[in-house]
Image (cartoon, coloured by chain):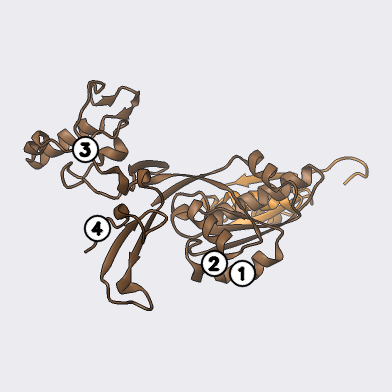
Amino acid sequence: MIIAQQKPLEEIKGLLANYQRVLIAGCGTCVTVCFAGGEKEVGILASSLRMAFQVDGDPKDIREATVQRQCEWEYIEAIAEQVQQADVVLSLACGIGVQTMAERFRGKRLLPGLNTAFLGYPVEQGVWKENCAACGNCVLDKTGGICPIARCSKSLLNGPCGGSHDGKCEISDDVECAWDQIYQRLKELGLLDNMLEIMPPKDWSTGRAGGPKRIVREDLRPLSMGAGEHLSMGADEQGSEGSTLAPL
Amino acid sequence: MNSGEFEPEIVAYACHYCAYAAADLAGVMRLSYPPNVKIIKLPCTGKLDVLYVLKSFEQGADGVFVAG
């Protein structure tokens, strides 16, 4: 899921300083599960802000609304009226939700209340770990299900490096060495031979280096021409030679 | 309440099984407690939520008392 953290209250107060009617919009999916922007966090933040502005002698009309997902048109339609009534919307969704809302409600000021951090999962209560970098070319089959792109500080494809010591990474003793973990996992699986396989340089164009990504599935489009499935890259997905990554 | 003297408004969240029962017993015994303490019964203080506390302050409470 997408992991996010709420911005500091003072920063949020600064964002809202020049507005009177504020709608705080929560999201019921990833940021609810990571306790950053769900219905409950919306309530707590709204209550805190009402009191904070009241104490500052600048009371504001702060309202609350939460949708199932802010990253889909169908869901955000449910709060269209509340959005229109507000001077500003503080979205407690991830960056995707904020942008979807900003696109749908053009002309309305949309502000982010969260800092979107990474793609990961909760390893224990109150602890989340990044474990996918959305690189667009998964190598988990070779690494025993541990991602060296997200978990290795250097995103090495052939590790460990010389900075690995006692299972820890050289950047901090709090960071585990992903390649040490991969080694241990492959050993458990009886697949240590995988370590001998040298992975060639990765095609990073499927990740951030390739520019904004876009997937087009012709079979799912309303007016499908029956062209099958395409994973296209780049802003101009119909254009340059490298734009179609994996026609199937 | 004495006029001119600050008397805090207190919201007391009390557990059904202990603190609220004690307050109930105090009532049966005809004991009085200050009128500026407002008791709200919870099935258990484990039900207390940060939102309850915030809402209490937001609506004018000077203090929140949790008993359980």
Q: Residues within 10 Å of mark 2 (few under 14, many from 20)?
A: many
Please give the residue where the numbered disc 3 appears in the rendered image. A201
Q: Amino acid at mark 2?
A: Ile
Residues at discs 2 and 4 both on one chain: yes
Front of the two marks 3 and 1: 3
Query: Residue at the location (70% across, 48% down)?
Result: A16
Above/below status of A128 relative to A43: above
Front of the two marks 4 and 1: 4
Front of the two marks 2 and 4: 4
The span from disc 4 to disc 3 (Cα, nearest Å) is 18 Å
Please give the residue where the numbered disc 1 appears in the rendered image. A80
Q: According to the rendering, which colour does chain B have? A: orange
CB atoms of marks 4 and 1 within 8 Å: no
The span from disc 2 to disc 3 (Cα, nearest Å) is 42 Å
Above/below status of B46 relative to A105: above
Secondary structure at badge 3 equals loop
- Counting from the top left corner in percent of width and height, residue A185 is at 16, 38
The span from disc 4 to disc 1 (Cα, nearest Å) is 38 Å
Q: Which chain is brown?
A: A
The span from disc 2 to disc 4 (Cα, nearest Å) is 32 Å
Chain where mark 2 sits: A
CB atoms of marks 2 and 1 within 8 Å: yes
Front of the two marks 2 and 3: 3
Sequence-earlier tag: 3 or 1: 1
Please give the residue where the numbered disc 4 appears in the rendered image. A246
Chain where mark 4 sits: A
